[in-house]
Image (spheres, rainbow, N blue to C red):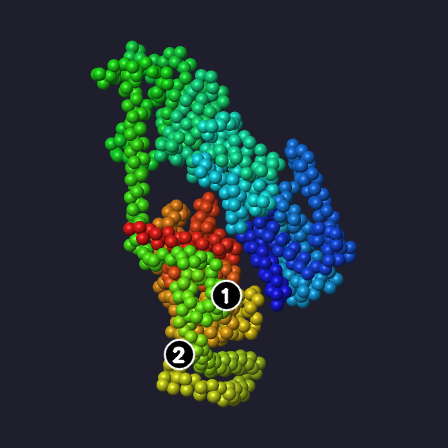
Amino acid sequence: MAEAETRQRLLRTVKKEVKQIMEEAVTRKFVHEDSSHIVSFCAAVEACVLHGLKRRAAGFLRSNKIAALFMKVGKSFSPAEELCRKAQELEQIVESKRNQSLANQDSLRRLPKLPSLSQQVVRNLWIRTALIEKVLDKIVLHLVENSSKYYEKEAVLMDPVDGPILASLLVGPCALEYTKMKTADHFWTDPSADELVQRHRIHSGHSRQDSPTKRPALCIQKRHSSSSMDERPSPSPSARDYVESLHQNNRATLLFGKNNVLVQPRDDMEAIPGYLSLHQTADIMTLKWTPNQLMNGSVGDLDYEHSVYWDYAMTIRLEEIVYLHCHQQVDSGGTVVLVSQDGIQRPPLRFPRGGHLLQFLSCLENGLLPHGQLDPPLWSQRGKGKVFPKLRNRCTQGSSDSVSDKEEDEATDYVFRILFPNSQSEFVPPELMDQGATMWQPTPRKSSCSSCSQGSFSDGGPPNGCNHERAPLKLLCDQMKYQIISRAFYGWLAYCRHLSTVRTHLSALVNHAIVAPDVPCDAFGGLTAEVWRRFLQDGTAYKEQELLRLVYYGGVDPSLRKEVWPFLLGHYQFGMSEADRKEVDEQVRACYEQTMSEWLGCEAIVRQREKEQHAVALAKCLSLSASVDNPGTVHRTTPHDSSISNESSQSCGSDRQSLARLQSDSSSSTQQELLDMYTLNLHRIEKDVQRCDRNYWYFTPANLEKLRNIMCSYIWQHLEIGYVQGMCDLLAPLLVILDDEAMAFSCFTELMKRMNQNFPHGGAMDTHFANMRSLIQILDSEIFELMHQNGDYTHFYFCYRWFLLDFKRELVYDDVFAVWETIWAAKYASSGHFVLFIALALVEVYRDIILENNMDFTDIIKFFNEMAERHNIKQILTLARDLVCKVQTLIENK
């Protein structure tokens, strides 16, 4: 049994990976060689090919068993011989590159034609090469046909069914074309969910939460094979992506670029040079500064991703910047300080000499047009292009427009404001805005004018004096102060409203009494065999609440689930004695057998009626055919049809009598309606039962028949509701654990008391969505804002399948068991709506990935569909329990 389960698991993995590759080929018209799906596929095929391999077939001393096997096959199979030659050439190139990398890092620059292969690709090099060369299916088929020569009897390829299936599965991937080209479609390809998760792990590994200049989220430009942090190549895909994003590409236009711009990231360190670049996309303009140490994307340093310089890299959205303070020094190229809306100053950017500061401002001004502008604008001077605005003469004796040659050579300071139409702050009073709109003239303040500040201000200051010039700066400071205070106030007000919403609208979602995990003892060990044995021996040894607390925090020991689940679902009560439990079992079994006898009688009539209809239709077709060939034979076929009808009616007489007994007090029209209703449900059940988890080891034909019996019995008792797709998914895990028809029927009936309202005939789904909306708005406003902006998918329809089936299709069976028993225990331990908090935890676990990639409704559906059966359920359950406790605490602190 264990070997059969292993074979099915290996084959199931290959099927899933083949499906991913074929879907990618259909939707994107090509498959990239570096796709993460290719890496996963090669690993899955290699696991199948190595399963049960004889030691002598792989070679006693060979570490690469696949290479040894393929070379052995190549002696008698020509496609494998050609493959071995190409794979060995690639191995030599990789080995040569590795040796030269260790000997001299600079030599990498002299090997431009060497392939950049990740460690996963190198590990599966032979399988991957066979796939690209389109001979993998032929080699595997050869291994299947000669399996006794290479494999033990328990191997996948020795199985008479699984072996040929595996070879057939590889035909599709081997027929595809693979590419390394960077086409336009390639740059815009959406990465898989697996790749997004891996990129996030790489990104979060070198980003520090306390860093004020945290490295920005990586722009997704092309697909790369992803790897864990310990196995990624040098440089990693994320580093290459970031460096490539600094240059002109299909997604952003490079407006300005200058190297050796100095920035002092921290007060305790020297200024370091870096590359300053200004990028413009269709929506935003972005300023990036990257230390020179990160600019070489081909270095061979394995610690490249861990470099501390990632903490110093800056990405600034220009829409967040309000002011640019430009300081010109006579002996250097000038400095720019960016001031954001909240008054925070970014580290100064010090330009080298040569007019680069003015060039930067000119490119910035051109990029802002036509939707924004610099205030004051740069002046256009014939022969010179853009120049700084002229300064007014601050001396009272001269004209306000006269400018001396000496003044042009002096160092001057400018403050430029970035203006966007219709983007005035909602917190600024109209009268202050009116003043601010007219306070800037092309007359920036002169940094050397210090003598005016010592003059007499008894008369309010001269009209052209420094006091008059400093007035706009005071207005700016007042405006900034007002904005900061306003935002603090509105933030506090929003928080109070959130608390009010929690207390008034969400208090019904959680139990008000907080059950601690460590009182009276640590509950994270779960319900163990020892605790359960003591409870069965002495019902007073543990109270029901204590047992439920253990299940909620630690789950049920897998060996006990068959005994404990009937208690959790309500089939038994916790205080029942053994005799009481046996009595309940006998009653349930008698009810189940009676129900089965009723619907089986009805089913026999349905089958007979279908046979009659089929016979009549067949006779009609024969009659029509005969009338075309010989019209005189039409009358002779009529008695034959009658005899068929009479014979059929006699054969089902006993079945009709049984139905009459079942419905003796009903009219014939009611009986006919009952037959039609049951027929419709029967066909739906049969379709779903045949498709239900057929890859799972438990569902043999005999057990699928049990599943059908239980479902038909339940629907017979609830014909007014009828069968709805998905009910089989809820029954299947119960049958796997209980492995008893009558017990599973009773527990399923109890489960459906809660789950029935989630189906279309109930109204619980809208309530779930509304509660989910409130929870996320309160507990994670940033995610909620993203959902609201990107097409407004705060309807949360992507959670529909989660709530409908209690996450059954999102998890593997072992995780489904753990989640379901936690939900059942949570009703008494923390919340009767624990499914909401599991759903919220699923979103929160991937929140950074969702935010970094700015996902819309389609993206998030695709992401979670691809992540199905790949979640870390321990992490999700822990987070869900923490979220419940967070809401309970908010309600408690009134």
Q: Is residue 22 above or below residue 388?
A: below
Q: SS for tag 1? A: helix
Left or right: residue 24 versus residue 113 is left
Q: SS for tag 2? A: helix
Q: Is residue 426 above or below residue 366?
A: below
The part of the image, by quadrant, that contains residue 383 is top left
**Which of these two is toward me, 725 or 875?**
875
Q: Which residue is mark 2?
A: 673
Q: Residue furthest right?
A: 75
Q: Is residue 712 above or below residue 311?
A: below
Residue 395: where, in percent of width, then height?
31, 13
Q: Is residue 594 visible?
A: yes
**Which of these two is toward me, 408 or 67?**
67
**Which of these two is toward me, 172 or 473?**
473
For the point 51% across and 48% down, the residue is 197
Tag 2: amino acid: Glu
Tag 1: amino acid: Ala
Residue 856: where, in percent of width, then height?
43, 49
Query: Answer yes or no: do the residues labelled 2 and 1 have beta carbons within 8 Å?
Result: no
For the point 44% across and 45% down, the residue is 851
Q: Quadrant of the N terminus?
A: bottom right
Residue 882: where, in percent of width, then height?
41, 53
For the point 43% across and 84% down, the residue is 659
**Which of these two is toward me, 455 or 237?**
455
Q: Which residue is mark 1?
A: 529
Q: Mark 2 packing: few (<14 Cα in 10 Å), some, or many (20+)?
A: few
In this rendering, which labeled residue sits more in front, label 2 or label 1? Answer: 1
